[in-house]
Amino acid sequence: MPDVRPNIVLIITDQQRFDTIAALGFPYMDTPHLDRLAREGVALTNCYSSAPSCVPARASLFTGYFPHTTGVYKNGDAWQHSWVESLAAAGYHCVNVGKMHTVPFLAPVGFHERYVVENKDRFLEGRYFFDEWDRALAARGLTKQRRELYRQRGDYAERVGAFEWELPEDLHSDMFVGNLAAWWLDHYPRTEPLFLQVGFPGPHPPYDPIPRYAEPYLKKDLPLAEVTQEELDHLPPPFQAMRQHNAEVDHDSIVHALHPTHAQRHRQRAYYLANVTMIDDRIGEILQALERNGYLENTVVLFTSDHGDCLGDHGQSQKWTMYDIILHMPTIVWWPGRLPAGRRVDELCQVMDLGATILEMAGLEPPASFEARSLLPLLRGEPGASGRDYVFAEHGRDGILRETEFVTMVRSREWKLVHFLDEPFGQLFDLTDDPGEVRNLWGDPGYQDVKRELLDAMREWLVRSNYSTREWASNCR
């Protein structure tokens, strides 16, 4: 009897904001293939990451637990097991092409095959790890664009991480990953059920699109949030310190500008968005490869990212903060004939909930201790299906977020609170009246009841989490 379980394709970009897909309400974007997935599938419009940097966010997604449960609090923390192991044990052929950000990089985490492509610009853990992309460049006698070379430019600091891709187009990391995934589908004997995870390195910096993709965006009037001195003066001290640190240390080839010009910010944003369009093109090619190899009729495609990028908003570089532009993720589930086309789900959910959803799609029961929740009832529009009352995110001290031990975020539909361990300061935002998260109400006497309510929700979440995951945590020791 043929196996009727669906093939599952999980596409994850790195550092992609919610406001980067035309079909989700951002007409300045050119994303026809993601628009198709949204038009024919279900978009989760209030889906949030559980961490504001790569490794803890991905460990959470691929285990089904929050960072305080996994013990993965920052980039570089080790994780090497995932629910992919359950898919493999159940008969799925599991393949990873591109970025997963496991630590170590080559940990199997359940995959039968891994074709690893990591960060564009590596300087910390695994600096001398040569991935599939490195080897492809070497085979052509080329050296990839990277920080040591960018530093030789006279305008290095002025570029705030935005550089043109100058090597052959097919060797750009995102073109390479998309083409490699299509190549695998074209050349590996058809095998079903298939779990294919495609991890694009972009639009993570350096912001390095192929010039022909950047040109249209350079001509557009792109939205750039105003950053006032008043907002900068009222940032929590750890975020003020991180802002200064990023101006002094060139993480990911970015010398952060404390007071960038409009032209600097516009070019940075244009290059970032151009990288999204490049990825969209490769997603189209992957869909075509699935179709020409007979997979598409019984395939579900899930698309998301691990976290976003401030791109100068709130005066910050990259991630590590708890603003919605960092934690609010574009998330789409495409399953024609099984899910209603064009549906929008506005309920709160976490990106890690995709793990429980994938297991259920594969006919597997998520572990009882899972903190991830299956989204299938919401995706199907089942009567009575509801999302979360609150979503959460966490991060520990690292080499960039250096002036706080631990930071935790709790968000309802109307309010957000950011808590710094052992500190009297924090952030509190009224998301109804202040969706841009500019006016911090933490110390306002008129909002202390709201602050207490959110702190109580955070306490109960942590207590429940520690109790409900006790068996899983014990087995991992």
Image: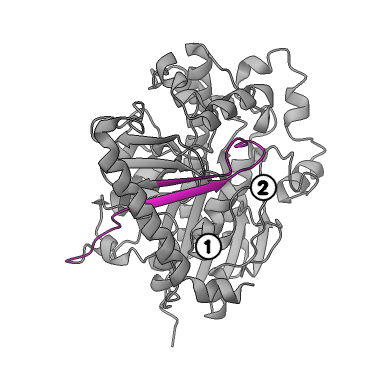
Q: Quadrant of residue 300?
A: bottom left
Nearer mark to the viewer, of 2 and 1:
1
459 sits to left or right of 343? right
Expressed as whole percent of the image width and height from the top left, the position of residue 79 reads 64, 61
Expressed as whole percent of the image width and height from the top left, the position of residue 165 reads 64, 28
At 35% across and 36% down in the image, what residue appears?
Answer: 428
Q: CA distance from mark 2 to mark 1?
A: 25 Å
Q: Per the image, is 408 magenta? A: yes
149 sits to left or right of 225? right
Q: Nearer the viewer, residue 218 or 475?
A: 475
Q: Let me know if residue 129 appears in the view.
A: yes
Magenta segment, which residues? Answer: 383-409
Q: Per the image, is 353 magenta? A: no
> Which quadrant of the rendered structure holds the C terminus?
bottom right
Q: Let me know if residue 190 appears in the view.
A: no
112 sits to left or right of 274? right
Numbered label attached to residue 118: 2
Q: Amino acid at mark 2?
A: Glu
Q: Is residue 277 above or below residue 98?
A: above
Q: Is residue 465 above or below residue 262?
A: below
Q: Amino acid at mark 1?
A: Thr
Question: Which residue is situated farthest in the left direction here?
Answer: 383
> Contact, CB < 8 Å: mark 2 with mark 1?
no
332 sits to left or right of 381? right
Q: Considering the numbered disc 2 on the image, is that residue within a helix, a strand or a loop? A: loop
Expressed as whole percent of the image width and height from the top left, the position of residue 223 reads 38, 22
At 42% across and 67% down in the image, what residue appears?
Answer: 356
Q: Earlier in the sequence, mark 2 or mark 1?
A: 1
Numbered label attached to residue 69: 1
Expressed as whole percent of the image width and height from the top left, the position of residue 258 reads 56, 17
Q: Nearer the viewer, residue 445 or 58?
A: 445
> Which quadrant of the rendered structure holds the N terminus?
bottom left
